Image (cartoon, rainbow, N blue to C red):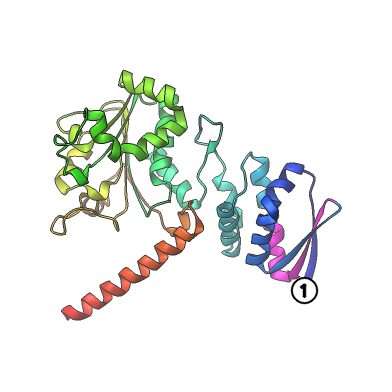
Amino acid sequence: MIKQEQFQIYDPRFERELFGNFDEHVKLIEKNLNIDIILREGKIVLFGEERNVEVAVKLLEELHGMVQSGKSLDRQSILYSIDVLFSGSGEKMKELEGTIVITKKGNPVQPKTHGQKEYVNLIESNDITFGIGPAGTGKTYLAVAMAVKAFKQDEVSRIILTRPAVEAGESLGFLPGDMKDKVDPYLRPLYDALFDMFGPDKFNKFLERGTIEVAPLAFMRGRTLDNAFIILDEAQNTTPEQMKMFLTRLGFGSKAVVTGDITQTDLPKNKQSGLVQAIKILDSVKGIGYKELTEKDVVRHELVQRIIKAYAKHEKRTEFKEKKKTK
């Protein structure tokens, strides 16, 4: 049954956000909901199948609420909202509200998917949290945001960011330059996230004081890290020995977040990933949280979601063929 519904617009900002550049957002909604949208005298008129029009009205209400809370609309947020509403979970959209920190440019850092929200909640309530997922799911960026929040609220006195320098085999002596020059290529993503949160001037000041420390994993050996928020990034490239070493560095008043993508291990084929092993060993240990993010949590270009799905299908087919060969 074809239905027509109206939606009143009272907020000029919402109208600008909803339509986007060259009406791109409205066209996106029309395409995905198979409806027609017309702006008429300050009202949006919706035409289409009854079910689709009903979803569209709920979508506009959700998007209006997002804009009122200070968010900007983009393709990813609109497509995710449509997906959630079609799955019958519309009432959960409000759970995503809540800013972790404000970046130096004044942009709020918030979870954009339910998976990300669960991940943030786990970091809040556990001393160690594992965030596993493909590229673009925000696992590292959100962990850094939570570290900055804890630091600003005086819950910790320093932030320590580390990752294994696998490409250099953790043996950095042969590389040119001082230690900062040697490790910068491996730690650049962590620098970039902190630049966003603090701005380069404040970040460099904290770095000089030792309030923020960014170092390769090898430098964690033999230390006890008290009153710190520690993030181990690219943890799929740790060996079991390195992972155990890192996890046992945790001191009093500290939190640790371990992030990685178990499908992107750069270790030699005969080496087991310390991240994969740790997930199995620590599965039921109290005080440790575990969140697996998926392609639904990707907040980069929507094509990234399709790429991840395609690779996942390929890997399943390859695994199935290998199992058949061994039978």
Q: Position of residue 62 (x, y in %)?
A: 66, 51
Quadrant assignment for the N terminus: bottom right
Q: Position of residue 70 (x, y in %)?
A: 63, 39
- Residue 32 lies, with reference to residue 194, above or below; the image says below
**On the rendered structure, is 151 left or right of 2?**
left
**On the rendered structure, is 309 left or right of 277?**
right
Using the image as rendered, state which of residue 323 and residue 26 is in the foreground: 26
User: In the displayed image of the protein, which residue is found farthest to the front?
Assistant: 176
Q: Which residues are magenta?
A: 42-58
Observer able to see residue 98: yes
- Residue 166 lies, with reference to residue 231, above or below; the image says below
Q: Position of residue 170 (x, y in %)?
A: 17, 40
Residue at figure coordinates x 52%, y 41% from the top left: 110
Observer able to see residue 127: no
Q: Position of residue 190 (x, y in %)?
A: 36, 37
User: In the displayed image of the protein, which residue is found farthest to the right?
Assistant: 41
- Per the image, label 1 sits on a secondary structure element best described as strand
